[in-house]
Image (spheres, helix red, strand yellow):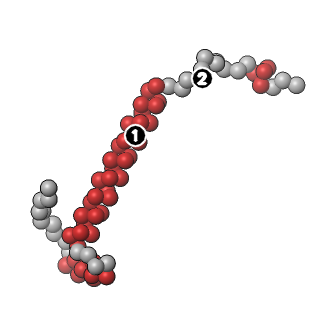
Amino acid sequence: MKQNITLSFDKHLIRKARVIAAKRATSISKMIGDELTRAVEEADRFDKARRQALAELKAGLHLDGHGPVPRDTLHER
């Protein structure tokens, strides 16, 4: 569902944006919508990755029952 909003920008910025939109055969509204969509999707991906990383940290490192290796074993000659 779409909803209209009102935004205010500098006239010079709007003028430049119109030129860019025309070159891309699109509208300023579509350009802004695409950028907002990209920003929201990026934030969602970051939040998901953050939750996964925190869950992995909370789960801890599993070494399959193997503890630290003795120093002598690592440096056998």
Quarter occupied by the N terminus: bottom left
Kindly report which numbered mark, 2 or 1, lies closer to the viewer in this rendering: 2
Whether 18 is drawn above or below 1: the answer is: below
Q: Is residue 3 visible from the viewing direction of this image?
A: yes
For residue 59, above or below residue 24: above
- On the image, the x and y values in percent for residue 32 come to 25, 66
Among the 4 quarters of the image, the one containing residue 67: top right
Depth check: give the residue in front, 74 or 2: 2
Q: Which residue is mark 1?
A: 50
- Give residue 11's position: percent from left, percent from top: 19, 78
CA distance separating discs 2 and 1: 23 Å
Q: Residue furthest right?
A: 77
Residue 63 circle label: 2
Find residue 73 and report its horizontal and vertical position in percent: 78, 21
Q: Secondary structure at mark 1?
A: helix
Neighbor class of circle 2 (other Cα within 10 Å; few <14, some 14-19, many 20+) is: few
